Amino acid sequence: MAEAFPVTEGGERAKALWSSGDYPLIAERFEPVADDLLDAAGAIAGRRLLDVAAGTGNVALAAARRGARVLATDLTPRMVELGRARATALGIEIEWKEADAASLPVPDGSVDVVTSCFGLMFVTDPVAVIDELGRVLHPGGRLTMVNWEPGRASQRLFEPLRRRLPLPPGPASTDAADPVDPGDWGRSEVIEGWLGSAFTEVACTRRPFSWDFPTAGQAADYFLSASPMHACALAALPGEEHAAVRAEVETMLSEFSTGGPVSVSSPYLLVTAVRAGS
Ligand SMILES: C[S@@+](CC[C@H](N)C(=O)[O-])C[C@H]1O[C@@H](n2cnc3c(N)ncnc32)[C@H](O)[C@@H]1O
């Protein structure tokens, strides 16, 4: 059997996962989501905004354009490198730091706004991370995040890989019994429990999103080469199995089409909350 899909832990294996594929091609599809998230964050001009699990900087860049003073953090050095280079090329001032979401490099109560776009949902200890967000935000500070809904159609695209690899719990999980289920971040009742008494004014809204492609074949090539999770898992398989995986993924994707364009619905949960206390 091929080596296990390297996704369960924070640290080195997660960094290897998130350095796989071609993430900027994924991130470009999330730019409207970053705007949706910031519209919900309220007034941010002049505010100290911390974007956690910032990836290549969609939210950080959009926030800086809206006048926020932005610190962008991410666990993965490759993401920080790409994000920093992107901001520099655009002439936009953002501070970048490598950091695990459970240990953020800022003092207590020093942040006005925390944001995260499809980032917090991939940490391994949600409760520790929520505690950390509560530590860095001052009372009245705002948390705004978006997380994929559980059971979204695009998760089915892991099945051809899952049949061949021992995928452990983690980002590719489709199993509600897993101890780390990223889908929990898309369940409002779970989020409300995690935020607990440290946050007030919790609001969760379901938003539509779809992955759209001209053909199922183009969609299969996109996911298998650009998506870090798919690319990482595919790379763990012997080369002679790649064509069969691609064919199975294309067949699945063709179910989201009536012969032409493909549209895979993947709603997300938009969450806003305010740090409690005075
Ligand atoms: C799906 S990407 C989202 C990136 C970005 N927010 C965006 O909207 O494109 C998930 C990100 O979470 C980061 N990540 C995963 N685990 C993390 C952790 N424990 N602490 C901080 N970042 C983490 C990954 O490196 C990756 O950049």
Image (cartoon, helix red, strand yellow):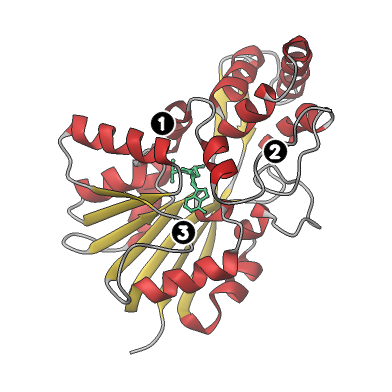
In this view, which residue lies farthest toward the bottom?
Answer: 278
Question: The disc labelled 3 sits on which kind of residue?
Answer: Ala
Q: Is residue 195 left or right of residue 74?
A: right
Q: Based on the displayed image, in which of its 4 quarters is residue 137 positioned? A: bottom left
Circle nearer the N terminus (2, 1): 1
| Residue at image mark 2 | 155
At 76% from the left and 24% from the top, the residue drawn is 252
Q: Is residue 1 above or below residue 208?
A: above
Q: Secondary structure at mark 1?
A: helix
Circle 3 crowding by C-alpha within 10 Å: few under 14, some 14–19, many from 20: many
At 68% from the left and 51% from the top, the residue drawn is 150
Q: Based on the displayed image, in which of its 4 quarters is residue 138 positioned? A: bottom left
Q: Position of residue 37 (x, y in %)?
A: 40, 53
Distance from Cα at disc 1 to Cα at disc 3: 23 Å
Q: Position of residue 212 (x, y in %)?
A: 55, 26
Q: Which is nearer the eye, 245 or 271?
A: 245
Circle nearer the N terminus (2, 3): 3
Q: In the rendering, which numbered label is found on residue 101?
A: 3
Q: Is residue 213 left or right of residue 142?
A: right
Name the image quarter holding the C terminus. bottom left
| Residue at image mark 1 | 28
